[in-house]
């Protein structure tokens, strides 16, 4: 099982984009641009049941040492990279761990990355696969969210339910 994160180079700086639990993160600024509830919307009132989306200049990926292989590299122009960075805070605030689209795939960190790639860069995220025989739960949910962006009847993103 994989936890996706992005490193984006915009021609001037490196940024780390990821979705993580809101508790237990490094102290100080870590580029938090969005957040949402975990498990159920009402649980999100507690920091223990919240996630945060980070777009962190010179950030770190704490579990990088356990990667199963080298990163997948996608070439974007500086303009495309800046557009991707500008969109991070627009990610839907769906409930982590819930199937908001009825596709048997939950919203999670992998969803954030596939949503960003699919909505911003023109990359067909559905064509990307994890290394080896790995699984990336949530990947299809991010693509569904990207597809639903212009169809307000597909998913009510305010509550993460169909």
Image (cartoon, rainbow, N blue to C red):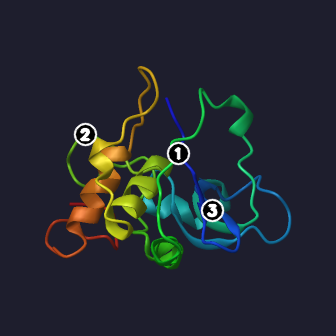
Q: Earlier in the sequence, mark 2 or mark 3?
A: 3
Calculate the distance from the C-alpha at mark 1 to the C-alpha at mark 2.
Answer: 19 Å
Instruction: Tally the numbered discs.
Output: 3
| Cβ atoms at labels 1 and 3 below 8 Å apart | no
Give the residue number, with chain letter if any, for mark 3: 46
Q: Residue at x 45, y 21 (%)?
A: 132
x and y percent of residue 59 in the render?
74, 60
Give the residue number, with chain letter if any, for mark 1: 4
Q: Residue at x 51, y 54 (%)?
A: 38
Classed neighbour count for the residue bearing mark 1: other residues with Cα under 10 Å, few (<14), some (14–19), many (≥20) = some
Calculate the distance from the C-alpha at mark 2 to the C-alpha at mark 3.
Answer: 26 Å
Classed neighbour count for the residue bearing mark 2: other residues with Cα under 10 Å, few (<14), some (14–19), many (≥20) = few
Mark 1 against mark 3, which lies toward the viewer? 1
Question: In the rendered view of the protein, which quadrant contains the C terminus?
Answer: bottom left
Calculate the distance from the C-alpha at mark 1 to the C-alpha at mark 3.
Answer: 25 Å
Q: Nearer the viewer, residue 84 or 49?
A: 84
Mark 1 against mark 2, which lies toward the viewer? 1
Q: Is residue 88 above or below residue 26?
A: below
Give the residue number, with chain letter if any, for mark 2: 104
Q: Secondary structure at mark 3?
A: loop
x and y percent of residue 152 in the render?
18, 76
Q: Residue at x 53, y 74 (%)?
A: 78
Give the quarter of the image for residue 25.
bottom right
């Amino acid at each position: 099982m994989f936890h996706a994160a992005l490193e984006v180079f915009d021609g001037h700086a490196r940024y780390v984009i990821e979705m993580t639990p809101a508790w237990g993160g490094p102290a100080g600024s870590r580029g938090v641009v969005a957040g949402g509830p975990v498990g159920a919307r009402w649980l999100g009132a507690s920091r223990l049941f919240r996630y945060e989306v980070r777009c962190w200049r010179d950030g770190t990926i704490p579990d990088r040492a356990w990667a199963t292989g080298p990163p997948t590299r996608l070439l974007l122009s500086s303009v495309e990279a800046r557009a991707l960075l500008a969109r991070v805070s627009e990610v839907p605030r769906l409930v982590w761990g819930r199937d908001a689209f009825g596709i048997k795939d939950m919203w999670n960190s992998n969803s954030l990355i596939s949503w960003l790639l699919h909505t911003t860069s023109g990359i067909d995220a559905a064509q990307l696969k994890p290394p080896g025989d790995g699984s990336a739960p949530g990947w299809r949910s991010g693509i569904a969210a990207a597809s639903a962006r212009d169809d307000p009847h597909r998913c009510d993103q305010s509550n993460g339910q169909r």
